[in-house]
Image: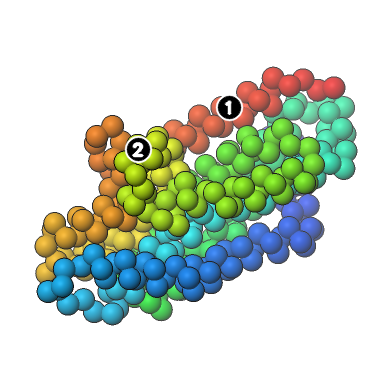
Amino acid sequence: MRTMIALVNRNRKLFFRDKGMLLSSLITPIILIVLYGTFLANVYKDSFQSALPEFMSVSDKLINGTVAAQLTAALLAVSCVTVTFCVNLTMIQDKANGTIRDFNVSPVKKPIVYLGYFFSTVLNSLMVNGLALILCLGYVAMMGWYLSVTDVIMLVVDIIVLVLFGCVLSSIVCYPLKTQGQMSAVGTIVSAGYGFVCGAYMPISNFGSGLQKILSFLPSTYGTSMLKNHMLRGVFAKMRINGFPDEVVSSIADSLDCNPVLGGNVVSTGGMLLIMLGSVVLFGVIYLIMTALTKKR
């Protein structure tokens, strides 16, 4: 345990010492929220207004609150995963500069070394995404606040689970990489494609039925949906108070991927959490097997 803690502290110090890596990790959520608020807000707003019946009158605060909740849920879904790839660069740097050779000749078991990378990535990613959550809640407060204390607590839980998922995923992907160029290429691909795959940039309900079925088997779908459910729960409750028919609220929820379907059945938020936790455990086992199979040289 002492060895593990020492490795985690060592990796965290390297992360904070590298100003470029630290700055890029911290500034990513800020850039995302500016880009989302600038370019996607109007798209989401027009889409939401066009889906409402003409006879219904909706306040600007409710519309803006709905759009803000959708935007911030999408941002956090992307940030929790993509930031881990940036933070996990320490493992690649150790391979690139030859530091990993020192660990290979040490009496420390190889899985312990890589668990040190994993837990340091978790802690650093939680710090960055905690900042992202604070920024997102501030944005929601300006646009239209409908969150309860329970919703905020559940959002914190969602972020922890998604960060764990992102960390095990990035650890598996980054493990075979040996140069920073390879890491940059992988990070670019993940940053560009993950938002579409998880339904952050565009709701999965807008995709074709075949693609929807394929994406329903990916854990990322349910991680994004968890965030959307907890961000939008208060908005949906306010809609019902304002006289929205249940059919209209359900239709809006379906269009925003709040009711994902797996095997013909709607997955509840509790089921989504179990899927994400199961994925973390499964990928974690795969990561440990990968590190244990390759012997030290």
- Residue under the point 24% across and 79% down: 59
The image quadrant where one finds the N terminus is top right
Q: Is residue 170 above or below residue 48?
A: above
Real-space Cα separation, disc 1 to disc 2, in angstroms: 29 Å
Q: Amino acid at mark 1?
A: Ile
**Side of 48 relative to 188 (left or right):** left
The image quadrant where one finds the C terminus is top right
- Residue under the point 31% across and 41% down: 209
Which mark, by number, is residue 210?
2
**In this figure, what is the number of numbered marks?**
2
**Side of 160 relative to 11 (left or right):** left
Figure quadrant of residue 166: top right
What percent of the width, then of the height, locates residue 121? 65, 47
Residue occupied by mark 1: 286
The answer to whether marks 1 and 2 mark residues whose Cβ atoms lie closer than 8 Å is: no
Q: Residues within 10 Å of mark 2 (few under 14, many from 20)?
A: few
Q: Secondary structure at mark 1?
A: helix
Q: Residues within 10 Å of mark 1 (few under 14, many from 20)?
A: some
